[in-house]
Amino acid sequence: MALHATHRDAGIVTVVDLSGRIVLGDGSALLRKTIRGLLDDQRKLILLNLADVDYIDSSGIGELVSGFTAVKNQSGDLKLLHLTKKVKDLLQITKLYTVFDVFTDEGTAVRSFS
Amino acid sequence: MASDIKHLEMTLETQVESVNLAEEMCLRVAEAAGFGEDDCYRIGMSVREGVINAFHYGNQERPEKKIHLAVDLTPDKMIIHVLDEGVGFKLSDVPDPLAEENLLSTSGRGIFLMRAFMDEFDVVSGKTGGAEIVMSKKLPAPGSNSPNGQGGHNATPQQEA
């Protein structure tokens, strides 16, 4: 399933709702474009809602890391919300689960930025 | 016995679409062979990573080069070969993606994932001179009634971080 991305404001935080697969090709490219677009708009506090993302390959992982680094480099923050089991497992075995701030509740996640 | 081995092979173009095509083909074989949902996920992911490796690192995304995919289904395991037309590489030269200095690298996790998700994994010198990834997964025991399988030797840990 192709990746879809929409974003909405939650106070000072921009929540990006993603659905589909973040994989080599259009999926990774859309994630990159979305995060870079938000940074261009000076939206530097980003919460990626991955509730409907059940598949990420190594390219997708690379894009998540790339986005995280780009946001951090602009003194912003990028956090993750609602990981599916497969995505959580993938971040655990790649040791990235400890790099990203991960939340299971959107309100808690949004408040953590302030 | 040789007659008990089912063999399937295909030649793929060096393009992004080949990654999905290879994954779908191998998933069909894995499902037909009786692998459970979780093992199919691990096999599909490993095939993706193998073909991505061939596409990007082996063939350097050069369209005149091909990717050769073969699947052998023996009585006890599914063996997958992914051969590129590059110059080959040594596993020992691949950086450890779990090393502190590589954690924020944007690439280099494909080999790690294949090793984690499959029971056997190796890279040999292929007949084209490129790298040939050879990986396998044991078939589920007949009547095991285990839809999720047991993962690879280094399969996903279940503990919380």
Image (cartoon, rainbow, N blue to C red):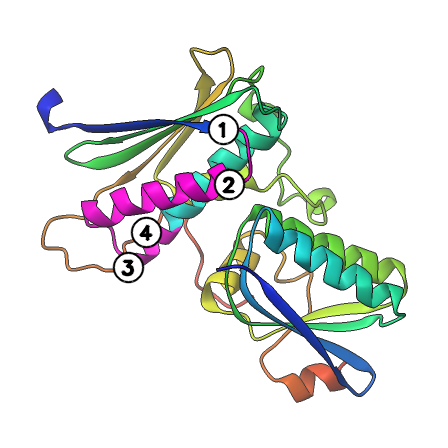
Task: Give the position of the C terminus of chain A as an image quadrant.
Answer: bottom right
Q: What's drawn in magenta, residue-wise? A: B13-41
> Do labels 3 and 4 touch, CB within 8 Å?
yes
Residue indicated by mark 1:
B13
**Mark 4 or mark 2, whichever is nearer to me:** 2
Instruction: Give residue A7's quadrant in the image.
Output: bottom right
Residue indicated by mark 4:
B39
As drawn, the label of residue B17 is 2
Label 2 secondary element: helix
Gap between marks 4 and 1 measured at Cα = 27 Å
Gap between marks 3 and 4 measured at Cα = 6 Å
Q: Earlier in the sequence, mark 4 or mark 1?
A: 1
Residue B33 among magenta residues: yes
Residue B78 among magenta residues: no
Q: Mark 1 lies on which chain?
A: B
Q: Which of marks 3 and 1 is nearer the N terminus?
A: 1
Badge 4 and badge 1 both on one subunit? yes
Q: What residue type is labelled 3?
A: Asn
Q: What residue type is labelled 2?
A: Glu
Gap between marks 4 and 2 measured at Cα = 23 Å
Is the residue B82 above or below the residue A74 in the image?
A: above
**A46, B115: nearer the viewer:** A46
Q: Mark 2 lies on which chain?
A: B
Q: Which residue is drawn at 33% across and 41% down?
A: B26
Residue A54 appears in the picture as rendered: yes
Q: How crowded is mark 2: few (under 14 residues within 10 Å), some or many (20 or more)?
A: few
Badge 1 and badge 2 both on one subunit? yes
